[in-house]
C-alpha cells in the first residue's frame, strides 16, 4: 500500500470511528424529517388554552356570525364596553362600532394579556367576511349565494416540458417548478454545508499537525504533497461515506415506506392521475403535491440525483479543501486563519446567492455561467439539476471542475510544502502567492 | 567510513545566524553526540540533515552521496518537540508510523509487541495518547522512530523529560541499537549522558563547531598531566618525595583507612615514569593513575573559551 493510501486510511478510520460522526450521520436525517414535520407537530402541540372573548357589538350584525373554535370562544355580552373591560376572568373584549360596515376600522380588541398574530388574523378575517357579504347584500342580487358558489375557483397549473422528451406512448409527466426549486435549494444548501464543514475540518487538522509538530515526523516519512493529498482524500472519503449512508437511507425509506405510508385511496387517485384516467382537478389534488410524491417514490431519479450530488460534492470538496489545506499549512492557529479564509468564502457565498436566483430562470446567463465556472459550479449546478437541464451542461461542468481540482491541488501543494515549516509570523496572502513561485 | 557528512553548512535567519560554516563527520556504527548549550544551533543542524530546513550554503552527504528524500524516508528521526496524535490509540498510532516507514501491518505488530514489553507499555496499547504521561508518550515516540530498524537514527534531545531510571533504559537501548549495526546521532546539553554512550562528539557553540573528535581522544588531548596518588602516610611525606618534580594540588585522608589520596600536577618536562619511580621509592604507594578531565569540564571550558 502506498503512502497516500496509508494516510487516507488513517484519516478515514479516525474520523468515522468518532462518536460525533456516528451521531451526526444518524441524527441529521432524523433532524431533517423533524424539520419537515415541524409545522404539523407545532399545530398539534402549540394549541394554547382556550380563550374567551366578550363581544360587545353595537352594530348587532357581526357578533352572531362570529364562529369560535377550540382555541377561541366568542361570548356575546350585553354589558357596556367599560363594564366588560373590568372582567379579568376572560381573555379580553372585542368591541365593534355601530357603523362597522361602512367604517371597517371601527373595531377594537382589548386584551388582559398579550394577544397573538393568529388570533388577530382570525378575528379580522371573520369580520372582513361578514362585512363583505353585508356590503354585497346591498346590491340586492337574486340568488347571490348560488352566484358566489359558482364563481369560486382554485386554479391548478399543470406544466409539461416539450424539450424533455418522454418516450413515445408513455403518459407525459407533469413537472413542477416548486418541487424542483425546493429540491435544488436543499441540494445546494447541503453542498454548501458540506464544503464549509469538511473543508474547515481539513484546515483544522492541518493546523493541528503543524502545531503539535507531528508534521516533523511525517515529512521524514512522506513528501508534503503525499501528506496533503492523503489528508484531503481521507476527509473526502468520510464525506462520501456520510452522503452514501444518507442516500441509501432516503432511497430505501422512499421505496419501501412511501407506498406503505400513503393511504390506499390516495395512492389509487395518484395512479389514476398518472395514467391519465383522471385530471388533477377531478382528483382534487395539487399538481405540486403530485409531482413531489411522484419524485419521492421514483427511486431511479432519486439515485441519479445522489450520483450527481456525490460527483459534485467530491469535485467541489477537493477543489475547496486544497485551498483550505494550503491556508491551514500557513498559519499556527485557527484564529490566525480567518483572514486568509476570505478568498475561499467569497466564491462559496457568491455561489449560494446565485443559486437563489435559479428559481427565477434556471437558464439565465448568470446562472448558466455560475454553474460552469469551477469556483461556483458545484453549488449552482446542484440547484439547477432538478430543473431537468441538458445533460451536456452537467458533464461540461464536471469536466471543468475536475480539471481545476488538479490545478488547485498542484498550487495548494506548493504553498503547503513551504507553509508547514513556517512558524511564528502570520503570512499575508501576498506571501502565500510568492511561495507558489518558489 | 562516514555514513553522514555535513560540509560547511551555513543557515542564516533574518535576525541571527543559526549555523556558521559547520562541518561534521559521523563514522558508521558510532554513537555521535551533538553537544552544546541551549540555542547553539544543534536542532537547526539536525533539521538541516533531515532536509526540514534548507541551508543557505553547504551540503549533506549520506553514504558519500548528496542526501535525497528517499534517504530521509529511511532514517529514523525523533524531533525535539514530541508530536503524536492525541486522540489516536497508542497501538494504532505506532502501526501508522511504522507503515509510513514501509513496514507491513503484520510485521509492525510483531515488532511493536516486543518493544512495548521491553518498555513496559503493553497495557497502554488501546489507550488514547492523551491518557499517557509525558514520559510514556516519549517512549512511544522513541519506539515509532526505531521500529523500522533504520541504518541511521537521529534523536533531538532524547533524554529530556525522562526520569533517571527511564533515561538509563533509553541509554541501554541506544547502545543496543548501535551494537545491532545502527549509527546514532543525538543532540543533548546533558553531559552526563555523553561519556557513557558517545563514541564521538561535536561541540557546537554560538553557531560554530568548536570541538570535534572521539571521546577518548578528546579527554586525552585535554588531560593536563594531573595524577592521583594513593599512599600510606601524611601529606608532608608526599611533598618531601615528589616536591621537586610535581606540585601537590590537594590532599585528603581517606576515612577509616590508613591511606591518603592526593592530586599532583607534574612540572613541565618531567617524565611520568620518573615521578612514579620517585613515589614508589619513597612512599608506601598503593596506586598511581592519570586524572582525565570529564567531558563536562571540557564542555564548560570549551564554551567559556578557556581550553
Image (cartoon, coloured by chain):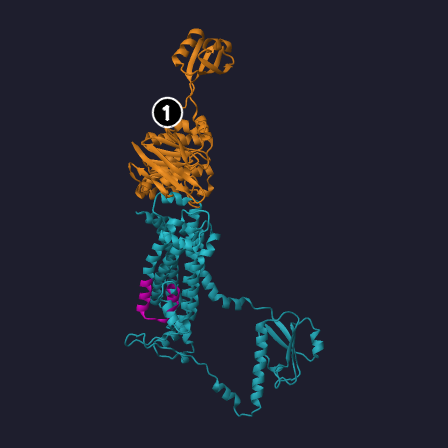
Chain colours: A cyan, B orange
Drawn side of residue A99 relative to residue B167, left or right? right
Residue A273: x and y in percent read 37, 77
Instruction: Please name whichever residue, B109 or B230, is drawn nearer the observer in this view of the structure.
Output: B230
Residue span colored magenta: A377-400
Vertical position of residue A45 compared to residue B298: above or below: below
Res. A169 visible in picture: yes
Vertical position of residue B131 compared to residue A354: above or below: above
Give the overall secondary structure of the magenta segment. Answer: helix
Q: Chain of mark 1?
A: B
Residue A336: x and y in percent read 47, 52
Vertical position of residue B37 compared to residue A213: above or below: above
Instruction: Please name whichever residue, A60 or B20, is drawn nearer the observer in this view of the structure.
Output: B20
Drawn side of residue B10 relative to residue A46, left or right? left
Name the residue: 44% across, 67% down: A353
As helix, strand or loop, the secondary structure at mark 1 comes to helix
Res. B144 visible in picture: no
Q: Is residue A280 magenta?
A: no
Locate residue B26: give its quadrant. top left
Amino acid at each position: 500500500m502506498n503512502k497516500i493510501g496509508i494516510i487516507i486510511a488513517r484519516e478515514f478510520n479516525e474520523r468515522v470511528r468518532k462518536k460525533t460522526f456516528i451521531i451526526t450521520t444518524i441524527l441529521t436525517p432524523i433532524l431533517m424529517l423533524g424539520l419537515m414535520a415541524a409545522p404539523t407537530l407545532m399545530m398539534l402541540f402549540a394549541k394554547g388554552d382556550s380563550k374567551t372573548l366578550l363581544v360587545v357589538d353595537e352594530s348587532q350584525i357581526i357578533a352572531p356570525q362570529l364562529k369560535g373554535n377550540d382555541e377561541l370562544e366568542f361570548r356575546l355580552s350585553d354589558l357596556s364596553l367599560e363594564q366588560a373591560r373590568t372582567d379579568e376572568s376572560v381573555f379580553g373584549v372585542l368591541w365593534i362600532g355601530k357603523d362597522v360596515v361602512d367604517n371597517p376600522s371601527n373595531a377594537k380588541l382589548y386584551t388582559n394579556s398579550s394577544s397573538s398574530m393568529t388570533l388577530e388574523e382570525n378575528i379580522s378575517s371573520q369580520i372582513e367576511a361578514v362585512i363583505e357579504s353585508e356590503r354585497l347584500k346591498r346590491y340586492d342580487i337574486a340568488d347571490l349565494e348560488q352566484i358566489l358558489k359558482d364563481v369560486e375557483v382554485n386554479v391548478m397549473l399543470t406544466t409539461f416540458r416539450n424539450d424533455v422528451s418522454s418516450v413515445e406512448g408513455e403518459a407525459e409527466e407533469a413537472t413542477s417548478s416548486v418541487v424542483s426549486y425546493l429540491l435544488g435549494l436543499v441540494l445546494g444548501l447541503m453542498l454548501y454545508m458540506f464544503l464549509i464543514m469538511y473543508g474547515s475540518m481539513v484546515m483544522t487538522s492541518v493546523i493541528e499537525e503543524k502545531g503539535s509538530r507531528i508534521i516533523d515526523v511525517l515529512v521524514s516519512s512522506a513528501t508534503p504533497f503525499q501528506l496533503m493529498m492523503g489528508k484531503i482524500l481521507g476527509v473526502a472519503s468520510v464525506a462520501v461515506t456520510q452522503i452514501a449512508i444518507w442516500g441509501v437511507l432516503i432511497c430505501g425509506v422512499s421505496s419501501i415506506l412511501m407506498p406503505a405510508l400513503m393511504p390506499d385511496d390516495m395512492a389509487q387517485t395518484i395512479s389514476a392521475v398518472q395514467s391519465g384516467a383522471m385530471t388533477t382537478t377531478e382528483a382534487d389534488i395539487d399538481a405540486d403535491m403530485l409531482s413531489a410524491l411522484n419524485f419521492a417514490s421514483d427511486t431511479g431519479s432519486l439515485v441519479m440525483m445522489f450520483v450527481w450530488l456525490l460527483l459534485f460534492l467530491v469535485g467541489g470538496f477537493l477543489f475547496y479543501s486544497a485551498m483550505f489545506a494550503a491556508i491551514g499549512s500557513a498559519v499556527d492557529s485557527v484564529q490566525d486563519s480567518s483572514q486568509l479564509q476570505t478568498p475561499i468564502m467569497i466564491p462559496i457565498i457568491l455561489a449560494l446567492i446565485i443559486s437563489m436566483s435559479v428559481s427565477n430562470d434556471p437558464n439565465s446567463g448568470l446562472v448558466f455561467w455560475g454553474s460552469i465556472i469551477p469556483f461556483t459550479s458545484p453549488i449552482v449546478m446542484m440547484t439547477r439539476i432538478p430543473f431537468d437541464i441538458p445533460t451536456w451542461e452537467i458533464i461540461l461542468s464536471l469536466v471543468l471542475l475536475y480539471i481545476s481540482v488538479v490545478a488547485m491541488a498542484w498550487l495548494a501543494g506548493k504553498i503547503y510544502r513551504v507553509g508547514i515549516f513556517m512558524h511564528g509570523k502570520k503570512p499575508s496572502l501576498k506571501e502565500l502567492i510568492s511561495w507558489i513561485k518558489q | 567510513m562516514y555514513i553522514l557528512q555535513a560540509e560547511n553548512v551555513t543557515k542564516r535567519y533574518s535576525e541571527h545566524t543559526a549555523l556558521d560554516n559547520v562541518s561534521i563527520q559521523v563514522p558508521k556504527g558510532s554513537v555521535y553526540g551533538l553537544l552544546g548549550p541551549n540555542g547553539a544551533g544543534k536542532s537547526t543542524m539536525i533539521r538541516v540533515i533531515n532536509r526540514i530546513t534548507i541551508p543557505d550554503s553547504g551540503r549533506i552527504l549520506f553514504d558519500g552521496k548528496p542526501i535525497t528524500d528517499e534517504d530521509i524516508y529511511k532514517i529514523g528521526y525523533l524531533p525535539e518537540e514530541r508530536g503524536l496524535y492525541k486522540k489516536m490509540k497508542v497501538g494504532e498510532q505506532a502501526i501508522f508510523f511504522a507503515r509510513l516507514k514501509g513496514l507491513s501491518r503484520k510485521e509492525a505488530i510483531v515488532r511493536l509487541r516486543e518493544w512495548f514489553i521491553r518498555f513496559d507499555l503493553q497495557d497502554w496499547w488501546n489507550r488514547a495518547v492523551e491518557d499517557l504521561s509525558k514520559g510514556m508518550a516519549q517512549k512511544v515516540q522513541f519506539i515509532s522512530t526505531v521500529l523500522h530498524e533504520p541504518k541511521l537514527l537521529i534523536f533531538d534531545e532524547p533524554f529530556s523529560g525522562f526520569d533517571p531510571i527511564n533515561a538509563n533504559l533509553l541509554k541501554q537501548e541506544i547502545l543496543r541499537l548501535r551494537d545491532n549495526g545502527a549509527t546514532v546521532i543525538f543532540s543533548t546539553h546533558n553531559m552526563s549522558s555523553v561519556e557513557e554512550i558517545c563514541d564521538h562528539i561535536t561541540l557546537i557553540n554560538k553557531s560554530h563547531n568548536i570541538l570535534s573528535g572521539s571521546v577518548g581522544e578528546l579527554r586525552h588531548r585535554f588531560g593536563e598531566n594531573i595524577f592521583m596518588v594513593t599512599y600510606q602516610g601524611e601529606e608532608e611525606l608526599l611533598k618531601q618525595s615528589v616536591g621537586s618534580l610535581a606540585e601537590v594540588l590537594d590532599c585528603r585522608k581517606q576515612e577509616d583507612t590508613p591511606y591518603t589520596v592526593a592530586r599532583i600536577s607534574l612540572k613541565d618536562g618531567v617524565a611520568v615514569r620518573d615521578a612514579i619511580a620517585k613515589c614508589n621509592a619513597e612512599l608506601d604507594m598503593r596506586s598511581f593513575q592519570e586524572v582525565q578531565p570529564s567531558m563536562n569540564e571540557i564542555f564548560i571550558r570549551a564554551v567559556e573559551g578557556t581550553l
